[in-house]
Image: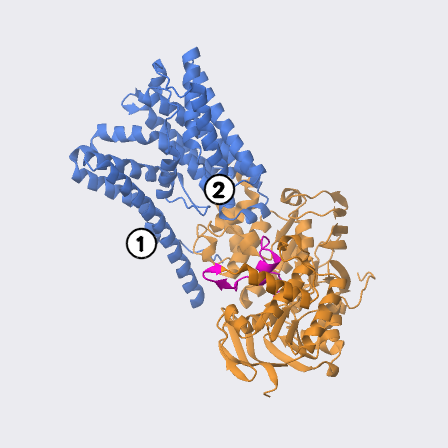
Chain colours: A orange, B blue
Amino acid sequence: MDSYKLQVHHISKSFPGVLALDDISLAAQSGSVLVLCGENGAGKSTLMKIIDGIYQPDKGEILIDGKKVHVRSPIHARKLGISMIFQELNYIPELTVEENLFCGRLPVRAGRVDWKTVRKRTVELLERENLHYLPTMRMKDLTVSDIQMLEILKAISIEAGIIIMDEPTSAITQREIERLFSKIAELKARGTCIIYISHKMDEIFRIADDIAILRDGKVVESRPREELDIDKVISLMVGRKLDSNFPKRKIEIGEEALRVEKLTAPGVFRDIGFHVRTGEIVGFAGLMGAGRTEVMRAIFGLDRFTSGEIIIRGKRVRISSVKDSKAAKIAMLSEDRRRYGLISVRSVRENVSLSNLRQFIYGGRLHGAKETKFVSDICARLDVKTPSLSTAVEALSGGNQQKVVLGKWMLSEPDVLIMDEPTRGIDVGAKYEIYKLMGDLAAEKRALIMVSSELPELIGMCDRIYVMCKGEISGELARHEFTQEAIMRLAMGFEKRTEEAS
Amino acid sequence: MNAIGKSRFTWSSISRSYGIYFVLVAMIILSSVINPNFFSGENISNVTRQISVTTILAFGETILIICGLLDLSSGSVLALAGLLSVASYQATGSMALAFAVAIGVSMFCNYLNAIMVASFNTPAFIATLAMQAMARGCALLFSNGQNIYQIGNYTKVGQGSVGFIPIPLLFLVGFFLATWYILNNTRFGRALYAIGGNQEAAKASGINVNRTKIIAFLVNGLFVGIAGVLFMSRVNAGLPNGAINYEFQGLTSSIIGGTSFTGGIGTAGGTVVGSFIVGFLNNILNLANVNSYLQQIIRGAIIALAVIYDIWIKGRRTRSLVKSAAAR
């Protein structure tokens, strides 16, 4: 076992309400690439943040070169030879290339920064790695892949024996990916241990020496690449237990409520086309960053799109603000309710009535009694548990906060209700209530769109599912075609299906 | 089944909502003990006249702070509006015109503030700081730095009475009612709280954020303009250098009255009480012959305490939320 560069033994970590990592053990060798894969929320990033010292594990230990270490902080991790390249590149736009490289560890002589040494070492590094940047260029003038390369350079410059890359290819082009891969090959040859997180199967099988699959905070499999194939990896990733316990109702599906055609926002999503009918619950599956939320935000008037049509009940509508979408009877529950859904410091009453105050205004005056009546009716229907309608929503639990947001949009009697991750961060009981409510809303001849990263709930609740991948709809599945594998294959862009499955 | 229970009236919830009112009452009692002259009709009426102008500014600040904005220009805009109003009264003898000029000038200045903030995304702090300098400069330029005296019946507004009630008190009550009504009974009021509480969520709820901010500044402009007439009328002159730092007195009253600088929280009642606390404090310190330099130190310390208390209460609330969530 001592030949391993990095080992983690029995690591567990929990956050309030969730066990993020459950007894994880992994090992990686020098001069090899260990690929970690798993669904959104499987625990990959949490594990990497523990190795990088951002989080402390509740249990378990980390060994480097066979010696037990306690990684106290990211700075300490650098000293131990661990370097991390984040999915979201973090750099300071106004810094120059050389300042960025030595950020946080500028050499100091007699109390002053030793710029001469900085310049000398920067030039040396750039030459050695065959990169052509001026040390005085500012970060903001570089492209994403340049910055990616500099991050790698930074990792090399601290003589990191272990480099962690969290989805490094999510923002760069094919040519740049090739550059990255040749760099990885070089690093491997030099004996660096690389841990690489990715969703992309083609990449995984190109660069991996070993593949570890995480699911629900556990390592479900860890093997050399040769012993695995794509199908095997996918089925291991999605092998979550399917709960048959969804309150799915049989509802007659009516006419078309919303149709979207060729909706495009360059660089975000393109050629999005789908439709929803009354009484129908349509799911949107996809990996993080596939563009699902962005499409919904555009339809709801929060973001712009450059071309395409939104058609409500056969009529084209122009939507450029929430005012327009409200008029078209579209409502949207945001995935981030604290940021886009709630005014936390204000009362339940004010939050619920916020987007429909007009109906309580008579001659410019807000009719408080009528408002209270409507709000308390809605809250009773949704079973919102709150001490009073005047309680600030920040005092409520996550599930009840979500019901408040839902109540706000129900008050507007929408024909089309978009729910983006409606059950994120709420407990099982509240989840079930939301599912039941979705059925009720569909039965009232509303059209529902449910964006979710949890495959079981999509499979349990939807009539049809669209799957998105890299800003496009990669497939559409009818209820009898629903399997976690089928959805995951489409989400990873493995097969493109265009035939209509209605 | 209705899951909404009755609101529980605990000591802590009462002290949180009404603590400021207790402070005012305690202060009145204490002051009466320190100096028996304090609680005389004449003295109270005096204090009311003194604080009327800054209280009106404080209402404007409250409306803006709730929405996540503020106005650092109100003192100098007041001076400019009041000065031009006095000048136009001298020229025409029309009080109606005097009011119209004051309101017009002040609303125009605040419209510029609004444009800078809403259309050009300038922070309100910077935009209104710029307006502070510009408006003061305009006032000095127009008057060539000279005060305007002999303003005749212009003084009636600030110094007169209806029966035994001083006219400034009537204005004060009027502005209090207007602010209270705006904050509690209009869509605009709710939009202010929503934007200050969470601008992104307000936008996602279909609230027109920019329009609301513009209207907030215009309402503030109306308040500041009328305060300008009251001020010049009280001091019996057109003073281009008048009302310096009044914006800070307005801000102080608003904050002591419980308006939260993080936005989304504040009331008309709290503001008026905050203003009276400041007014009574100055008054009793004067009656007790406290050194005027020392008075400044005391005023500063009270602002610091009020804000520390506000943040402490919020922290305690968050901690108790975390605790109750963990217990769940």
| In the rendered image, the vertical position of residue B59 relative to residue A477, given as above or below | above
> Residue type at mark 2?
Cys
Specify the quadrant that holds the C terminus of chain B.
bottom left
Whole-percent x, y for residue A136 in the image? 62, 55
The residue where tag 2 is placed is B67
Q: Residue at x 24, y 40 (%)?
A: B294
The number of numbered discs placed on residues in the rendered structure image is 2
* Residue type, mark 1 in image: Trp
Q: Secondary structure at mark 1?
A: helix
**Residue A253 vertical position relative to residue A73 in the rendered view, above or below:** above
The answer to whether any part of residue A170 appears in the image is: yes
In the displayed structure, does residue A235 sit left or right of residue A135?
right
x, y percentage for residue B195?
52, 44
**Which of the chains bears the disc numbered 2?**
B
Which label sits on residue B122? none
A103 magenta-colored? yes
Q: Is residue A222 above or below residue A352?
A: below
Which residue occupies the foreground of this view, B190 or B150? B150
* Residue A55 point in image, percent of width and height: 51, 70
Quarter of the view holding residue A327? top right
Q: Residue at x 69, y 69 (%)?
A: A199
- Image: magenta residue range: A86-112
Q: Is residue B80 left or right of residue A219?
A: left
In the displayed orientation, state which residue is furthest to the top. B92
Q: Is residue A154 left or right of residue B25?
A: right
Share a chain, discs 1 and 2? yes
